[in-house]
Amino acid sequence: MADTDQKLLTFSLGSEGYGVSILKVKEIIGMMEITPVPRTPEFIKGVINLRGKIIPVMDLRTKFGMESQEYNERTCIIVAEVLINGAQKLLGVVVDMVSEVVTISDSQIEPPPEYGTAIEHNSILGIGKIKDRVVIILDIDQVFVCDEVVKMLDNVREG
Amino acid sequence: MNFSKMKIGLKIVLGVLLVELISLASGITMGKNITSHLVVMGCLSTVLISQYIAWVVSDNITKSVKNVLESLSETSVNLTSLSSDLTVTGSKLAAGTTEQAASIQETSSTLEESESMVHQTTQNTKEADSLAKTAKEFANKGNLEMQTMLESMEELKKSSSEISKIIKVIDEIAFQTNILSLNAAVEAARAGDAGKGFAVVAEEVRNLAQRSAQAAKDTSVIIEGNINLSEKCLIVTGQVNDSLVSIKDGTNKVSELLEEISTASQEQEIGIGQINKAISQMEHVVHGNASTAQESALSAEQLTVHTETIGEIMTSLSSLIYGEGKGVASVSSKSSLGFKRFEISKKQSNPISDKPARRQPKLTEKPAKMIASYDAKPSSMGTPEDIIPLGDF
């Protein structure tokens, strides 16, 4: 299998490092005012108005069942393009801190462990090894696959 | 009383009386006129009787004079011993007064030294006082400067806080830049091969942003340290300020005490000056006393000499009354000084004069013999008359 390089945007939640394919990322913005939306799951913080576009925002900590944390100046929202039901949707993801853009080859990626993570297995693409660090590479499409999100995203589009 | 002259007269009268008796006897035997002889004899008898009366009277006077002489002798002896005592006492007094004068002189010099020392102390105290005042002024000045420093410190703290804010802003900018660079990287990635160069630029921008962030962080740490130091400085300055206030109070007290000491020293100086005056007066008086004591000692010595002379006179007088070497011997033996002149008078005495004066030769003795014996006397007994000239009876 030929070594293909791919670029990852790395960020951190707590002490753990995560990465998503840069092609899935639309842009990165600092924390801004989030308007809560009633009757949404707990991990959906609300919606933001990004240059006239209403984008739902979810808290990855809450989604992954981690202890929530006060938002600070380091807290960022990664706006990602998610493929839901064959359509590209924009979704904001609140992370503790955005780290950097790294280039990683397939040889640096290991398959996800069978157990021991708080995340559903199908959301993890693999474990990337960058120098001494470990980066959990997430399949951002899978992370958001749940009825609530789909429903909410449908609503947004309709709205 | 001129005994010798009287004796001579008596002898002559007796001789003439004998001659008359012989001629009367021969006249009776020869039957001559004896009337003239009887007249002569009567005259002579009258003379004899008058002589006898004179002798008795003189004997009584002699007795009284003897008594007076004895008491005089005793008094003279007492006087001698007293005068010698007086001499000794006078000498002692003179020596004591001299010693006292020396002591007073010493005291005077010591006092003068003390005076100069007190004067020095006064000067030193004045100097110390002025120094304390200067110290007070410096403390005041220090206090004011401390206040200025406190204000400066406060300002420094404020500016440090402002710098801290600015650093925060820089950090913020760095963070935003970082996000921008990441966005740029995202855009570059989306552009595919066309965005490769842009990705490099984005990476560089990100590096710069991170360096800015790091620099801001370091500066922030330093500024934090500065703020802490300023706070510590403020505390220390406050303490120094307190210390300066304490110093000021202390110097105030020191100044007050020094002023008191200065006043006391001045008073002491005046007191010592007065004491010095009194001592010098005392010195004068003691000097006068010393000379007076010496004079009195001298006078006592002279008195002793005079007393001795009186003793000698007494001896001569007694020898004159008792006959030589009698009566006064007991007196002279009592004398502490001893009358040497008495010994001389003893040497001068002859066997006849050793006998009491009234034990005169009997009338039965031959006039020529008696005259011869009396003639010898004046040569040996010249002194008493020389000392005390006695008038004739």
Image: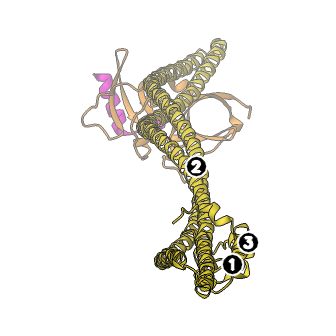
**Viewer-side residue, B27 vs B89:** B27
The residue depicted at 70 percent of the width and 29 percent of the height is: A4
Q: Estimate the spatial distance between the alpha carbons at disc 2 and disc 1, rounded to whole Å.
A: 61 Å
Give the mark nearest the N terminus, 2 or 1.
2
Q: Amino acid at mark 1?
A: Met
Q: Residues within 10 Å of mark 3 (few under 14, many from 20)?
A: few
The residue depicted at 41 percent of the width and 28 percent of the height is: A92
Give the mark nearest the N terminus, 1 or 3.
1
The picture quadrant where one finds residue A155 is top left
Give above or below for A33 relative to B19.
above
State whether discs 2 and 1 lie on one chain.
yes
Give above or below for A68 relative to B309.
above
State whether discs 3 and 2 lie on one chain.
yes
Callout 3: helix, strand or loop?
helix
The residue range painted magenta reads A142-159
The picture quadrant where one finds residue A100 is top right
The residue under label 3 is B376
Quick one: which chain is orange? A
Quick one: which chain is yellow? B
Q: Residue furthest left?
A: A38
Give the mark nearest the N terminus, 3 or 2.
2
Q: Amino acid at mark 3?
A: Ala
The residue under label 2 is B291
Q: Is residue A108 visible?
A: yes
Tell me the chain of label 2.
Answer: B
